[in-house]
Amino acid sequence: MPDLPLDADLLNSRRRLGERIRQLREARGWSQDTFAHLAGLNRAYPHKIETGKVDLRYSTLVRVAHVLNITVADVVTLDVT
């Protein structure tokens, strides 16, 4: 059984995912408020996502992907250049 990642690794992954979502949102020219409205999220939630302050549920990832018109796999691809 593989070792579980350290808390610091999990936090780093959440931050990187949040950064990825921010880049995707900004590429569409959307404010956090617009993104929240389109995804059916609380107004403050995109900020929490983008700063890695929340551990996203799969259902939220599905909503995010749907609104961005991409797959969940595209959302979680963290190798952004």
Image (cartoon, rainbow, N blue to C red):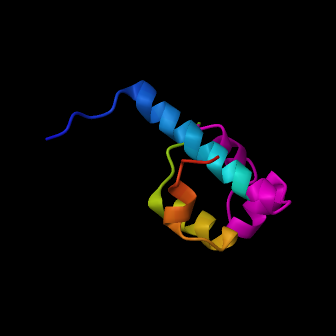
Q: In this view, does 12 lie above or below 43?
A: above
Residue at 71% of width from left, 49% of height from top?
Answer: 22
Q: In which quarter of the image is residue 25?
A: bottom right
Residue at 22% of width from left, 33% of height from top?
Answer: 3
Q: Position of residue 74 (x, y in %)?
A: 55, 63
Which residue is most to the left?
1
Q: Where is residue 60 in the image (x, y as percent from the top left)?
A: 55, 61
Which residue is most to the front?
81
Residue at 71% of width from left, 57% of height from top?
Answer: 24
Q: Position of residue 38 (x, y in %)?
A: 74, 69
78 vs 4, nearest the viewer: 78
Determine the main secondary structure of the stretch shown in magenta: helix
Residue 28 part of the magenta segment: yes
28 vs 67, nearest the viewer: 28
Q: Look at the image and give the residue range highlighted in magenta.
A: 25-52
Q: In this view, does 17 lie above or below 60?
A: above
Check the picture and name the quadrant holding the N terminus: top left
Residue 60 visible in the shown view: no
57 vs 78, nearest the viewer: 78
Residue 80 visible in the shown view: yes
25 vs 60, nearest the viewer: 25
Q: Is residue 7 above or below residue 1?
A: above
Residue at 86% of width from left, 60% of height from top?
Answer: 29
Residue 29 part of the magenta segment: yes
Report the label total. Answer: 0
Horizontal placement of 21 versus 61: left or right?
Answer: right
Horizontal placement of 3 versus 15: left or right?
Answer: left
